[in-house]
Image (cartoon, helix red, strand yellow):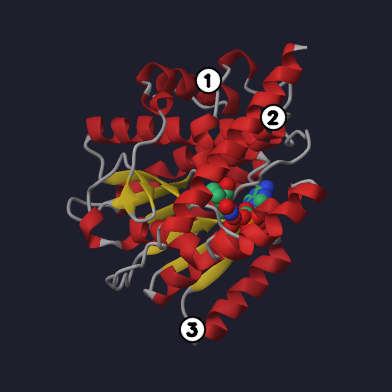
Amino acid sequence: MWWLLHCILGFIRLYLDGVKVLLYQLFNRSFTLPDLPKQNGKVAIVTGGARGIGYEISRHLVSLDMHVVIAGNDEQKGLATVKKIQEELNQGKVEFMYLDLASLTSVRQFVQRYKAKGLPLHILVNNAGVMLVPERRTEDGFELHFGLNYLGHFLLTVLLLDVLKKSGKPGKFSRIIIMSSASHYGGRLTLDDLQGRMCYSAHGAYAQSKLALLLFSYHLQNQLWVRGDPVTVNAVDPGMVDTALYDNLSSLAKLAKKPFAKLLFRTPAEGASTAIYSAAASELEGIGGLYLYNGRKTESSALSYDERLQSKMWKESCALVGLQQN
Ligand SMILES: NC(=O)c1ccc[n+]([C@@H]2O[C@H](COP(=O)([O-])OP(=O)(O)OC[C@H]3O[C@@H](n4cnc5c(N)ncnc54)[C@H](O)[C@@H]3O)[C@@H](O)[C@H]2O)c1
């Protein structure tokens, strides 16, 4: 019985958070990107950069003369996106590399292939994600939202940290941008049931994955500061954006969403603006540990700032992906 209540509460919390965001978007214009400095010589990885918000981030970073690696699990789409960006921008340094975040082996192989290229890494945008997927497991047996949105990005980031640290320097920090969501406000984290085995709610699982990303983001930033490493980590909330992320809504919810999406949802380009700003704005040089929404610093949930929970999650995540803690 209590699992049913848990599912219903997860569902209600997610939709309430959605309503709050839509009301905000009704009365506030989308953040307008200022002119950003050219980024010649810089290299970025954008996960899920082949469509939606990730595509807009990739395209904009290439237009700033960054070398962008689009990392995704759909090779055909990825290569087509590379071609599209090159045609639109009349060339530009952009390439596709295969990465399936739902497979820890694929994450490790991606990092190996990336490192073999000998490229530096100045910007890592952890953008890819899925939402409201019916109960499924990753290749490694993790609940899909947790395994893909969170653990895949956790491993990717930790394995790329050495390159990010080497590529940054005082006054020119490397930057990690983590795509969170307002759904994290309603997120709950049950450390002894991270895989939702006791009771599964797709709404709860998505919110949990976004909360876990925030706990990770703050904890990692603290570690980097303590060690004096030239890398910053900021989390970004893109708002509610009309993309394929909503493809898993029920038919009824999709129907109800249609008029709202036209009127109130942000376009992918608008949704990408805060992430692009975090990646390239001079005024964010050396600044990390923020939750940014609509171009501004905002408070995330009280739970996300809980340092004990952050460190417990860090330890648990290292154990789950088979990493030695440092
Ligand atoms: N759209 C919104 O309203 C909204 C709101 C808050 C947060 N977000 C977040 O923004 C990010 C981008 O979402 P979007 O709205 O552009 O959705 P989208 O569905 O258009 O894009 C998601 C991207 O993730 C990639 N992806 C999915 N599974 C993958 C896997 N196994 N390995 C590698 N890549 C994979 C997809 O190929 C796609 O490129 C997500 O993290 C999402 O949670 C979106």
Residue that protrudes farthest toward the right in the picture: 251
Q: Amino acid at mark 3?
A: Leu
Residue at the spot of label 2: 142
Q: Position of residue 112 (x, y in %)?
A: 54, 48
Residue at the spot of label 3: 89
Secondary structure under tag 2 reads loop
Say left or right for 175 vs 259. Answer: left
Task: Out of 111 and 124, give the one closest to the viewer.
Answer: 124
Q: Position of residue 279 (x, y in %)?
A: 36, 58
Q: Is residue 318 visible?
A: yes
The quarter holding residue 63 reads: bottom left
Residue at the spot of label 1: 316
At label 2, counting other C-alpha atoms closer than 10 Å, the crowd grade (few under 14, some 14-19, many 20 or more) is many
Cα separation, mark 3 vs mark 2, equals 39 Å
Q: Is residue 12 above or below residue 53?
A: above
Q: Is residue 232 above or below residue 167?
A: above
Q: Amino acid at mark 2?
A: Phe
The quarter holding residue 95 reads: bottom right
Secondary structure under tag 3 reads loop
Cα separation, mark 1 vs mark 3, equals 43 Å
Q: Earlier in the sequence, mark 2 or mark 1?
A: 2
Task: Out of 75 and 12, give the one closest to the viewer.
Answer: 12
In the image, what residue occupies the spot 31% across and 51% down? 296
Q: Position of residue 208 (x, y in %)?
A: 57, 30
Say left or right for 197 vs 273. Answer: right
Q: Earlier in the sequence, mark 3 or mark 2?
A: 3
